[in-house]
Image (cartoon, rainbow, N blue to C red):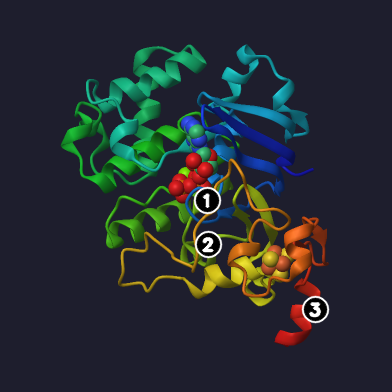
Amino acid sequence: MNLLEIENLKTYFFTEAGVVKAVDDVTLSVERGCTVGLVGESGSGKSVTAQSVLRIVPRPGKIIGGKILFNGEDLLLKKEEEMRKYRGKKISLIFQDPTSSLNPLFTIGSQLADIVIEHEKVKKEEALDRVIKALRIVKLPDPEHAIYQYPHQFSGGMKQRICIARALLLNPELLFADEPTTNLDVTIQAQIIALLKDLQRELGMTLVMITHDMGIVAEMCKYVVVLYAGNVMESGSIEEIFERPHPYTEALLKAVPRLDETRKLISIPGNIPNLIDPPSGCRFHPRCQYAIDLCKEKKPPLEDVGNSHFISCHRWRELQGGRS
Ligand SMILES: Nc1ncnc2c1ncn2[C@@H]1O[C@H](COP(=O)(O)OP(=O)(O)OP(=O)(O)O)[C@@H](O)[C@H]1O
Ligand code: SF4
Ligand SMILES: [Mg+2]
């Protein structure tokens, strides 16, 4: 059994301007012990997918359909009280911005120890020992001293290590890392990626790596799920996806920024669609160089094309012939 199976998930935001279909019929699976990349441009629904799994979608967002099976149990059927036991303990999330996710008013030791105390009802000394161990795992220098310091006393890279330690405190089975290196400079990014890679291997953790960056995906992930405008364009092993990409992934791959750039933005021609009134048929059709009339008219199903590769494109098979 896969650790996580998301089936036909729909998460919409009910705004005054209209209904934003942020995650619209998303199906994906995450195998235990693997690193899976969740990629797509800004606004494609990556964060909302992670928020849906933890059931922390902010207002005016609402999960309106689908299943989220974690170890075979549907999280969407759990009571809020039960869900609290999943958050942090079984499923954890590292946010994009370490600065805003640490509380500036409390020492690192105190805010991390509180998490252990809340979930495991242990004494403060034992909780602090656990915090020190977690800080050691993420290679924060001098953890015994660090627990008495405040967030502002650390650099961005060190703060992100602290956030990773916080996410690991309760030994979660599944960790989402939501663009954990976006606000860090290139050298520090590489260190954080190397750290996550080591942790995944050493702890046998299941990691979902959310990123814009196909370079990071190539370096870290065994499987990839590509999102576009709230829809899954394709999912499969890294080899399959790099060798036989969906037209959108092909465009993303061409847009991999050079290593000496900030790696922040990828740009493919055209604009990301408005999700209140998304394009008909294949949502990528206004930007796709291979689009034909059928693409405007009919949404392509997510089809199994072999080797556990799933593709949503009317023309993929035909294009494979053309490309080889
Ligand atoms: N609180 C909100 N209210 C209204 N719309 C929202 C809200 N949060 C997200 N959305 C919309 O949902 C869509 C998906 O957003 P999401 O944050 O998941 O994108 P993302 O893929 O994580 O992008 P990024 O790479 O920029 O983080 C976007 O169109 C966004 O505008
Ligand atoms: S279905 Fe059509 S528009 Fe969509 S990716 Fe395939 S070729 Fe392009
Ligand atoms: Mg996001």
- Distance in Å between CA atoms under marks 2 and 1: 8 Å
Residue nearest the viewer, comparing 62 with 34:
62
For the residue labelled by badge 3, is the local secondary structure a helix, a strand or a loop?
A: helix
Kind of residue indicated by mark 1: Met
Tag shown at residue 209: 1
Q: Mark 2 or mark 3: name the one nearer the start of the chain.
A: 2
| Residue 86 point in image, percent of width and height | 60, 25
Dot 2: few (<14), some (14–19), or many (≥20) neighbours within 10 Å?
many
Q: Find disc 2 in the rendering and name its residue.
A: 217
Among the 4 quarters of the image, the one containing residue 140 = top left
| Residue 75 point in image, percent of width and height | 70, 26
Quarter for ligand 2? Answer: bottom right
Closer to viewer: mark 1 or mark 3: 3
Q: Is residue 76 above or below residue 7?
A: above
Closer to viewer: mark 2 or mark 3: 3
Q: Is residue 203 above or below residue 226?
A: above
- Dots 2, 1 in contact, CB < 8 A: yes
Q: Is residue 36 above or below residue 277?
A: below
| Residue 45 point in image, percent of width and height | 56, 45
Residue nearest the viewer, comparing 134 with 313:
313
Q: Find disc 3 in the rendering and name its residue.
A: 318
- Distance in Å between CA atoms under marks 2 and 3: 27 Å
| Residue 316 point in image, percent of width and height | 76, 72
Which residue is rendered at x = 61% and y = 44% of the image?
277
Among the 4 quarters of the image, the one containing residue 126 = top left
Dot 3: few (<14), some (14–19), or many (≥20) neighbours within 10 Å?
few
Kind of residue indicated by mark 2: Val
Kind of residue indicated by mark 3: Glu
Which residue is rendered at x = 43% and y = 15% of the image?
117
Which residue is rendered at x = 69% and y = 75% of the image?
244
Is the C-beta of the residue carrying label 2 under 8 Å from the nearest atom of ligand 1?
A: no
In which quadrant will I find the N terminus? top right
